[in-house]
Image: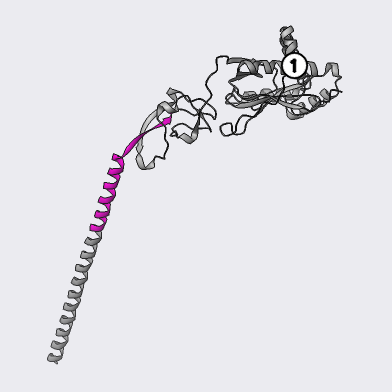
Amino acid sequence: MSRIRFRQRQRLLAAAAGAAAALLLCAAAGTFYIRHIEKSYEKERSGYEQRIAEMDAERVPVYTLTRDIQAGEKIGEDDLVEVEVVKTTVPEHMPPKEDSIGRYAKINLARNTPISESMLYEGAPTPRDLRNQEFRLIELPSRLQAGEFVDVRVKFPTGEDFIVLSKKRAEDLASGTVWVQMDEREILTMSSAIVDAYLNDASIYAVTYVEPGLQQAAAVTYPANASVLDLIESDPNIVERAVTELERRMREKLERGLELLTPEDIQKYLNNKANMTTINPGTQDNALISNETANSAESQNSSVPEEEQSFTDSSTVETGE
C-alpha cells in the first residue's frame, strides 16, 4: 500500500516538475518575444523621429495672407507675411513676395492662405488718363457689393442691348451711387451712352460677373453714336443735362414705389431694422420695398404715358409706346 502511494507521489512530482519546466520555457519565450517587439518598436520610433527631424530641418519660407482677399482685389505689401513650413508640404511655383505684390487674386482667398502662382494674375498698368467716376443713374444689382466686377450695359426700347463698359470694379457703393475707374475713351463712350439713353428713353444698368478672377472681360459692343459725339462737342452741357434727366427719372420711379408702401409695410421694415445685428453698408439691399410692392410699381410704370414714363427697368424691355 505504501509502495503505491510512493509511486503516485513520484508521478505527481514529475508532472509538477514538467509543468514548471514548460511554464519556464513559455515565460522565457514570451519575454524574448516581448523584448523583440520592444526593440522593433524602438527602432521604428527612432526612424520616425529621425525623419521628422530631417523634415523639420528642411523648411522653406512661403508667404501667406494677413487678411481675406476678394477675387479681383490687388495684393499689397502689408497683405503678405513670411512663414516657414516643411519643404515636402509646399507645392511648386510659390512666388516670392516681390512677385506677388501688385498682382490680383483670381478667386476669394482666406486669411493665412499660402500664395501660389495659380491664384494670381497680372493687372494692366495704370494708364495716365485713369480717373475715378461716380454714377447715380446706373441701375445696380440689388446684392452688388463693393469690390465686385460688373458690365455696364444700355438697353433701348427696341430691345437692342449693348455693353458700354466691360468688367469694371465697383470701387465703392453708397445709397445707389457707384464709383468706378475709367480712362478717357471709356468716359467718352459712357457719355455717349448717357446722351443716347436720354434721347431715346433707354436704360443703363449693370450686371455682375460670376467668377471675375477666371472670366475674361466681355467685349464692348456699344457703338458710340457719331451724332451724339458731335452733339457733345458742340454742347458739352448736354451730358450734364442727360445725367440730370436720367437721375430724375430714377427718383420718380423710387417715389412711385414709396407711395405704394402701406403703413404695415413701413412698420414691418422698422421692426426688421430694429432686430438687425449687422449692417453691411457695401450692399444695395432694400428691405423696405418688398417684392410684391416692387412688382406693383412695375405694373404701374407700364401704364404711365410716354412723357411721364420713368427710367426703364433693367429686367424688362420697354416698348416706348
| Whole-percent x, y for residue 145 in the image | 60, 25
Q: How is the image coloured?
A: one colour
Location of residue 82 (image quadrant):
top left
Q: Tell me if residue 319 is in the magenta stretch.
A: no
Establish if 90 lies above or below 127: below
Location of residue 203 (image quadrant):
top right
Magenta span of residues: 39-65
Establish if 257 lies above or below 71: above
Task: Note whether residue 104 is visible.
Answer: yes
Q: Quadrant of the C terminus?
A: top right
Judged left or right of residue 265, residue 146 is: left
Q: Quadrant of the N terminus?
A: bottom left
Residue lying at 82% horizontally and 19% vertically, measured from the top left: 309
| Whole-percent x, y for residue 72 in the image | 54, 28
- In terms of secondary structure, what is the magenta stretch mainly? helix
Q: Tell me if residue 61 is in the magenta stretch.
A: yes
Say which of 155 and 295 sits in front.
155
Establish if 167 lies above or below 19: above
Q: Which residue was labeled with disc 1? A: 226
| Whole-percent x, y for residue 220 in the image | 67, 26
Residue type pointed to by label 1:
Ala
Helix, strand or loop status at disc 1: helix
